Amino acid sequence: MLMLLIIDSSIDFVKERVTTILAPLASQYNLSLTSFGEDLSSGAPAYGSLILSDAWGTALTPAPVSPSGTDSAPYTLLSASIKASIVDSGITDKKVSGLVRVLKS
């Protein structure tokens, strides 16, 4: 079964997906596998270790996508305010000028 990762995938889903992909490789190359603190090794002697972990222990659940369309008046107002602020600021930096042109449209 094909399981894709998308920007709003939960932390648990990402951990499960990475483990699912790498477990067969660890077995194929005779490596012990520790996945996010859980030892998944078969107990047989291994030639090395594959340890999966959250590097800094700071994994965050993604924020929900802000609604858009006719039913999202507060978000539409916020978006328009931000765009107007950037356009009215008179920013002339070349890196931002393209953004200003896009926001004016």
Image: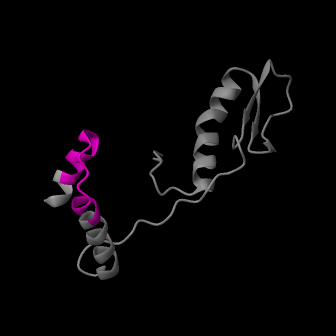
Residue 10 vs residue 79: left or right? right
80 w.r.t. 105: above or below = below
Residue 48 vs residue 85: left or right? right
Residue 62 vs residue 66: left or right? right
Q: Nearer the viewer, residue 64 or 78?
A: 78
Q: Which quadrant is home to the C terminus?
A: bottom left
Range covered by the magenta-colored residues? 85-100
Q: How many marks?
A: 0
Extreme-left residue of the structure? 105
- Taking the spot 79% from the left edge, 21% from the top edge, the residue there is 48
- Answer with the quarter of the image where residue 47 lies: top right
Instruction: Give coordinates of residue 88: x percent, y percent.
Output: 22, 63
15 w.r.t. 104: above or below = above
Q: Nearer the viewer, residue 90 or 42?
A: 90
Q: Is residue 89 magenta?
A: yes
Instruction: Give coordinates of residue 16: x percent, y percent.
Output: 62, 48
Q: Does the magenta stretch mainly form a helix, a strand or a loop?
A: helix
- Taking the spot 67% from the left edge, 23% from the top edge, the residue there is 28
Q: Nearer the viewer, residue 60 or 87?
A: 87
- Please say which color scheme the image uses: one colour
Q: Is residue 70 magenta?
A: no
Extreme-top residue of the structure? 47
- Answer with the quarter of the image where residue 89 lies: bottom left
- Answer with the quarter of the image where residue 65 lies: bottom left
- Taking the spot 24% from the left edge, 50% from the top edge, the residue there is 99
Residue 24 vs residue 65: left or right? right
Instruction: Give coordinates of residue 49: x percent, y percent.
Output: 78, 26
- Taking the spot 71% from the left edge, 44% from the top edge, the residue there is 56
Instruction: Give coordinates of residue 15: x percent, y percent.
Output: 63, 47
